[in-house]
Image (spheres, coloured by chain):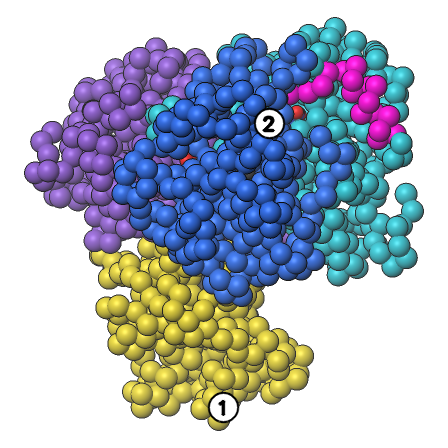
Chain colours: A purple, B cyan, C yellow, D blue
Amino acid sequence: MSRIRAGQPDLSVEVGSLQLTNPLCSASGCFGYGLDCDPLLPPEVFGGVVTKTVTPQPRKGNPVPRLRETSSGLLNSIGLENCGLSPFILEKIPALAARGIKPIVSISAGDPQGFADMASALNREPVAALELNLSCPNVASAGANFATDPGAVVEIVAAVKGAFTAGPVWVKLTPNVTDITAIAAAAAAGGADAVCAINTLLGMDIDLTTGRSPFARTTAGLSGPAIMPVALAAVYRISRSVEIPVVGIGGIASAEDVLKFLAAGASAVQVGTIVFRDPTLPARILDELAAWLTERGCDSISELETAWR
Amino acid sequence: MSRIRAGQPDLSVEVGSLQLTNPLCSASGCFGYGLDCDPLLPPEVFGGVVTKTVTPQPRKGNPVPRLRETSSGLLNSIGLENCGLSPFILEKIPALAARGIKPIVSISAGDPQGFADMASALNREPVAALELNLSCPNVASAGANFATDPGAVVEIVAAVKGAFTAGPVWVKLTPNVTDITAIAAAAAAGGADAVCAINTLLGMDIDLTTGRSPFARTTAGLSGPAIMPVALAAVYRISRSVEIPVVGIGGIASAEDVLKFLAAGASAVQVGTIVFRDPTLPARILDELAAWLTERGCDSISELETAWR
Amino acid sequence: MRASLTANYRRGRVISCQPDGDLYFDLELSVEQETPAQPGQFYLVAAEESLDESLDPLLKRPLSILTSTNDRLGFLFKVVGRGTRALARLDEGDGLDLLGPLGNPFTIDAEPQPLLVGGGVGVPPLIFLSQQLSAAGIAHRVVFAFGTAGDIPKWLLQGMENKVEICTLDGTCGFHGNPVDYLAAEQDRAPARIQACGPGGMLAALRGLRKPGDEIELSLEEHMACGVGICRGCAVPVKDGDDWRYATICREGPVFPDDVLHHGELEAPLTGPGSACRCGEENNE
Amino acid sequence: MRASLTANYRRGRVISCQPDGDLYFDLELSVEQETPAQPGQFYLVAAEESLDESLDPLLKRPLSILTSTNDRLGFLFKVVGRGTRALARLDEGDGLDLLGPLGNPFTIDAEPQPLLVGGGVGVPPLIFLSQQLSAAGIAHRVVFAFGTAGDIPKWLLQGMENKVEICTLDGTCGFHGNPVDYLAAEQDRAPARIQACGPGGMLAALRGLRKPGDEIELSLEEHMACGVGICRGCAVPVKDGDDWRYATICREGPVFPDDVLHHGELEAPLTGPGSACRCGEENNE
Ligand SMILES: Cc1cc2nc3c(=O)[nH]c(=O)nc-3n(C[C@H](O)[C@H](O)[C@H](O)COP(=O)(O)OP(=O)(O)OC[C@H]3O[C@@H](n4cnc5c(N)ncnc54)[C@H](O)[C@@H]3O)c2cc1C
Ligand SMILES: Cc1cc2nc3c(=O)[nH]c(=O)nc-3n(C[C@H](O)[C@H](O)[C@H](O)COP(=O)(O)OP(=O)(O)OC[C@H]3O[C@@H](n4cnc5c(N)ncnc54)[C@H](O)[C@@H]3O)c2cc1C
Ligand SMILES: Cc1cc2nc3c(=O)[nH]c(=O)nc-3n(C[C@H](O)[C@H](O)[C@H](O)COP(=O)(O)O)c2cc1C
Ligand SMILES: Cc1cc2nc3c(=O)[nH]c(=O)nc-3n(C[C@H](O)[C@H](O)[C@H](O)COP(=O)(O)O)c2cc1C
Ligand code: FES
Ligand code: FES
């Protein structure tokens, strides 16, 4: 990709075959369907727009409360509230396309066939990539989920790859496993073009007026700066164990954080929770990223390595 | 246990057969051998004094840096630096005994026999309980550790139970597993008297001057308030899946936090990292715990349930 | 739902932050390029630039707009936890990050006659509403409820004393009891536009007072993260044809016409732990 | 190692917090029941009570004692990150939590003549030491190094100008270069007690200057958590008979006689990333 402005460092990155104008993508679930926060935070800011996970059918989501703040973290139990695949294809994708944006579409389904069906429906649409959300912690079936089972991961990814040829397929991993590199390897074995790490950590809170969890589903997903060290370790370990690129996610709140993920082995990153604190932050992060590179004499992200030699 | 002062609520708790004067114990590794911080933080404050993990032989520990702060968290890579079992028995236990304190002794060894040998050496000593540290994340053998392997857990616990009859045996669990309740069940099957959850999360940092982890061993253990939601979920899930008591650990920084762990199902708790921020905090937490109970008309911790009915 | 956000991200500077009564703080700010705000709208508020120094607390806190003029913003808040405790410490000249104005306002209309009912932290938007109604020459009633006389933010209510009918739960000032009991006693009340903000229990009970010709607008509360509808955290069930769906309080509310809300399976409290429809098989996130 | 801690946990109140030069801040506090402190000792410092409002940053920050009288404490610090940025914002009257005095001081002795060598944030304890030496009538030299003239905390060095020999790395003031080059030029220097605090590289190089009769005391730095020897976080290898062991800088240091340190496998920098013995098979924690 060419430089945006003369004299400014080139922030573009490649995640495998996918070129992004900058390494900062929106994390699924933290930016709606890409235009919901416009014009406060226009989707054009992001190198890639990952949309809220859609499922084959619409989902109402979980009862309130759905949020609790923890120390430097956020617990959420939204319950995959989404409009379902058809309205997504009929309304959300065209709205983005009208702005010249091809989203990275996060999908989730109940079985490999469900994933494959969604993937083939999306194969005809202007989308940049698919992101498979296998990693919702705490599903109704007591903690068990696809993303903890290497066999299921291979099967789902292979099914999606068979159905989707319009772009790369990313697989989003849960940190709630004994060895995340084994799941990453399964994704690669299934044919994934990249893995994204991490989804939320399994967490909980207690409401001291009742002595019980505030959440209807008891546990919830922990995100935000609190989890960044866990995410960095995951990205580092995965990037040294599989050949496919890694997209880093978890707690990013500054340009320094982005650089830490790139140094740990990520090809790009996603920001989620911190955008709730300050929707103007993504733009500021990119400015600071450019300034950091310039200070160290790097003309582009690809020259980052030289700053550390 | 009788009340300390008339009119003050009774803070004593039972962890199985072990009576503690209050639910607040020191976490292993965060309080030395019990007297190292005296008189600033006298060991008598704690309901139970869990000592730094000792190994059969002394260990020098890891090179510096060993610490990095993260958002509301602390990464450590101390490397199990300890004096070894013999000096511990010859010097540390008698020093505590002279103060009338029987420690809860954290031990770790390279194999089940090693654990059993340590346990029988300690069986003749004035100790209140053993805590088995199976859960050091990130050992040299690439992530593999006893605490992630239910079979190993059963074997080690059974070996220790055969060798140690002087008091209960607690098993400390790592959160870095797909299903912590399976490991807790293995501990129970091996004969453990209680499980302690959680040890540190696998984490990492990057030094932006080098682009590399500051730690010689790359990854490190994450503790502090950042991890409390993960610990609460673990305690909740474990306490509903095994019959033995659970000791809650992870990020506790206030009386409210202690109450949350008790509500989630813990019989007692341990405080670690936060003591580094403020060594006077444990005493203050106990005062606030007493005040909280009094306000809600509870005469003792055992009446806590009534506050939530 | 509005097509796009009119909210802005902006800086404010503290003019004053003073205790008012035993529980509340009055916070007055000067702001750059203030967007005109209407009663019922709110801001997300946090100490300025704290992201560089501290990521705990992580999120902004929602506060209803109490006053809004060209370059001034006023809030009234109660200290309940860490975020509001930090706000209470603000000194003159300190900076704030502000996102807003957010959400949809109360209706301003003379017919039926507005009856404002506020409890606790629900009072600020109704003070603002009352002032706007008065400015528009619209006759209205104001009923405010507090726990006890000492809680009443007296400084703030200066000039409104004659207009406000006060209830205290302990009877130390005005009517002894909650505003629902107070109003329930009025057998022959004329049809009113009941505009209410306060605890979920109060709002739910108010609905029981409905008489023919009444219109009811309720301003709801829930923990918020984004404040702009993208996190889906602040959900409330609303009618959706024959079905229902979750609306976001921050974007589609906080003010809802009562008859839009889906009360089907709801227990007494409108929102809050254990209140909304616990309908089955959803996953987290 | 001392048998028990003489440190206390106490509160301080800001008398003033002022920039001094382009990099440093002078912080003066009043404290309750101050324990007499000696040059080389330090405190762990954090904004008061912030635990109730924020757990980030989590830990206190170590700062060397610059001045210590009955009820006054002085520090000089450089803003490098979040913790020191927060300290730089302190206003008169703000509260601080303090743990200290911690660690072991420099030796105060006339023979051999003390030669104080400080670089950057290593300067404060040596200013304190110089004052104590002067008070005890002990003749000594002081060599301080800064990056550039603008960095020099001039306000602080008032009254010491005649005594201090200044080096700047860019030559904008005093000797052009680092203090090691400066001292290396002195072929016929008399035996000295070199008492140094500063960057690891400087300390390591200073050891290369040793002449017969010299005694060297180095004050070391490392990230700290507890400050009292219980977390084992601030380790430095020291001799232990024929072997070596990790000592804690907070409890057994920060001042170490050079010949106690175990330099065997060490590269140039004394502490810091990649510097100490990476000896094999230890686990974390
Ligand atoms: C649209 C809207 C307008 C509001 N206007 C005002 C106002 O004008 N004045 C005022 O004093 N308060 C108002 N609130 C409530 C205020 O936002 C909360 O009291 C505040 O966020 C608590 O933050 P904290 O960090 O002090 O408390 P925390 O430490 O986060 O929590 C302390 C307690 O408050 C509860 N709480 C926290 N956030 C909320 C919330 N958003 N809604 C309900 N309960 C909560 C928690 O469950 C907990 O019990 C409003 C809330 C909303 C959603
Ligand atoms: C015994 C002792 C005495 C000290 N005395 C002084 C003093 O008098 N004046 C002064 O300005 N500074 C002094 N320091 C250094 C000071 O403690 C650190 O600069 C401070 O803790 C950084 O905190 P921060 O939150 O601002 O930076 P962080 O955000 O924590 O880190 C910013 C940068 O500083 C580095 N850093 C952080 N802590 C330390 C540390 N303890 N040692 C070395 N590097 C660190 C980090 O690696 C990072 O590169 C002393 C340190 C020690 C151990
Ligand atoms: C409110 C909320 C909703 C989320 N919804 C989704 C989702 O629908 N699909 C998904 O894959 N991840 C979802 N996530 C997880 C984020 O995409 C991200 O993996 C996680 O929050 C960690 O990043 P962060 O710390 O930057 O937020 C959600 C997170 C939050 C906070
Ligand atoms: C510096 C440090 C050293 C530790 N050493 C040990 C140890 O030796 N053995 C052990 O079982 N846990 C050790 N831990 C883990 C703690 O006991 C505790 O499980 C963890 O820190 C979570 O609790 P916290 O958040 O209250 O610190 C250590 C933790 C820290 C921070
Ligand atoms: S707070 Fe995010 S949707 Fe309302
Ligand atoms: S800081 Fe804990 S041992 Fe030195």
**B260 sits left or right of B66 in the view:** right
Q: Quadrant of the N terminus of chain D?
A: top right
Query: In the displayed image of the protein, which residue is found farthest to the bottom?
Result: C162
Q: Is B258 above or below relative to B185?
A: below
Which sits in the foreground, B76 or A92?
A: B76
Which sits in the foreground, A189 or C275?
A: A189
Residue numbers of the magenta segment: B79-97
Tell whether position B94 is magenta. yes
Which sits in the foreground, C39 or C207?
A: C39
* Three-letter code, disc 2: Pro
**D253 sits left or right of D189 in the view:** right
Q: Chain of mark 1?
A: C
Disc 1 residue crowd, few under 14, some 14–19, many 20+, Cα 10 Å: few
Give the residue pinned by disc 1: C161
Question: Could you tell me which secondary element the residue under label 2 belongs to?
Answer: strand
Per the model, the C-alpha gap separating discs 1 and 2 is: 75 Å
Q: Is A3 above or below relative to D130?
A: above
- Residue C108 makes an appearance in the image: yes
> Which label sits in the foreground, 1 or 2?
2
Q: Position of residue B218 (x, y in %)?
A: 46, 20
* Three-letter code, disc 1: Glu
Q: Which mark is residue D257?
A: 2
Q: Is C230 above or below relative to C96?
A: above
Residue D228: quarter of image: top right
